Amino acid sequence: MDAIVAGRGTRGYGSDELSWPHGIFVDTNSDLFVADFDNGRVQLFPFGERNAITLVGFGSKYASILLQHPSEVVLDAYRYLFILDTGNRRIIQEEPNGFRCFVGCSEEVDSQIRFNGPSSMSLDSFGNMFVVYSYGDHIEKFQFLENSCGFAFNQPKFCSKSVWSQNGMTVADQFTLGSKPSALFIDKKNLIYSINRETMKILVWHQGNIEPTKTIFTGFFNSSSLFVALNGDIYIDNGARSAVKAWILNKKVFIDAMSVFSSCTSLFIDLNDYLYCSMSNHHQIIKKRLHERIMTWTSAAGTGVKGSSSTELDNPYGIFIDSSSNLYVTDCGNDRIQKFRPNVVGGTTEVGRALPARFQYSLSCPTGITLDAQGFLFVVDSKNHRVLRSGISHMRCVLGCDGISIKSTQFLFPSTLAFDSDGNMFVMDSGNHRIRKFQYS
């Protein structure tokens, strides 16, 4: 039996009305998305509802853009919208912090002629886009570039006997970083990012440069961490004011990314576009989907109460989420590394002094963690002033080790680490107010 699921059968602009609707898309929740052609908007009809929410276009209460005769709407696996904006001869793509032109963006005459008369579009299983042109009587394919996805940081592949030079060099000192710096990020272009808390600035510089090539004033008091997305947007802790902020690269403005109630000692964006925050003072890791417009979060690990059981944490610091959505936490107060699998409340101990730890190894307030391309752990063991690496069956010290008294290798409460594309290791030596680089060999 047929049933009307959207619109009243007459043209209109109300929340329960449509005007010349064209493309539709129904997601796995049975929610209906409609390209409301003549009203210049995309409407969302939640399952069972006759009144729609305007997602994009005139009348939307969300971060949006103006549309002219949208004719098609498609969602990808992460629920991001692709909109065929026919009147403007372009395709619009949704991103975590708004929308951008995806195809047909140039204002040059040649580009507009090339993208003339698009009428329909679709995505294949590989992410390639196909556009039908009613005027040109042809179908065009836009190839998906695989390297446009993935992590924004380097994950080198190392051999089992890899070593790093014990003669480290100072990349940045207290004059640049200020006192007790903690934030460190290196992207795939080998740009180094950090924060000077005293000047309230984000610092960016090319490896090899002595001074930052770019600074961004934040006005944020006592920021502890940052994370850079693939598109260059910078997420930064502003927990003193109950928020994580995002610096939008192409707009040069800060926007709210997540509401929190504690400073984030570590931030991370996983491959499913979840933003994670490690709230050390509240003994909990939280997360939020980037493209969701509400600022609230859900718990990823910890109960919010200090403890040492498999479901609890004690002053967690560094976090890392691998490609399988496993969450690794440096559980500082419990001197262990915890691993939380997706949708499992309790964690398992990867590194710690007692059974059932996968690697039995004595730690003292671990604060930083990353994984290489093969999934081996690199841990900053802060109060032991050293860096550790896991192997197939054991942990070993790689920097700041017992019996090595080279001054350039000595740390004072290091906090985090990162790699460049060549496998060189960078360590935030917080107690000495500097970043040290150790050559991979």
Image (cartoon, helix red, strand yellow):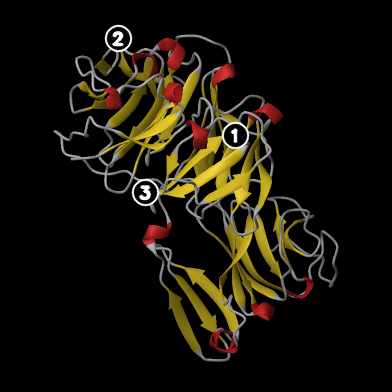
The answer to whether residue 168 is seen in the rendering is yes
- 372 or 404: nearer the viewer: 404
Residue 382 appears in which quarter of the rendering? top left
Q: Residue 113: where, in percent of width, then height?
A: 57, 89
Nearer-N-terminus badge (3/2):
3
Nearer-N-terminus badge (1/3):
3
> Looking at the image, which residue is at 46% across and 81% down?
140
Nearer-N-terminus badge (1/2):
1
- 62 or 352: nearer the viewer: 352
Mark 2: few, some, or many residues within 10 Å (few <14, many ≥20)?
A: some
- 111 or 128: nearer the viewer: 111
- Outermost residue toward the left in this view: 161
The answer to whether residue 291 is seen in the rendering is no
Q: Which mark is residue 237?
A: 1
Q: Which mark is residue 63?
A: none
Disc 1 or disc 3, which is closer to the eye? Answer: 3
Q: Which residue is mark 3?
A: 208
Going by the numbered disc 3, the residue's amino acid type is Gly
Judging from the image, what secondary structure is the residue with disc 2 in?
loop
Q: Which residue is mark 2?
A: 353
Judging from the image, what secondary structure is the residue with disc 1 in?
strand
> Looking at the image, which residue is at 79% across and 55% down?
51
Going by the numbered disc 2, the residue's amino acid type is Arg
Mark 3: few, some, or many residues within 10 Å (few <14, many ≥20)?
A: few
Q: Residue 370: where, in percent of width, then height?
A: 36, 33
Residue 368 appears in which quarter of the rendering? top left
How many discs appear?
3
Going by the numbered disc 1, the residue's amino acid type is Asp
The quadrant in which the N terminus is found is bottom right
Q: Residue 372: where, in percent of width, then height?
A: 29, 38
In the picture, measured across the screen, residue 423 lies left or right of residue 73, that is left
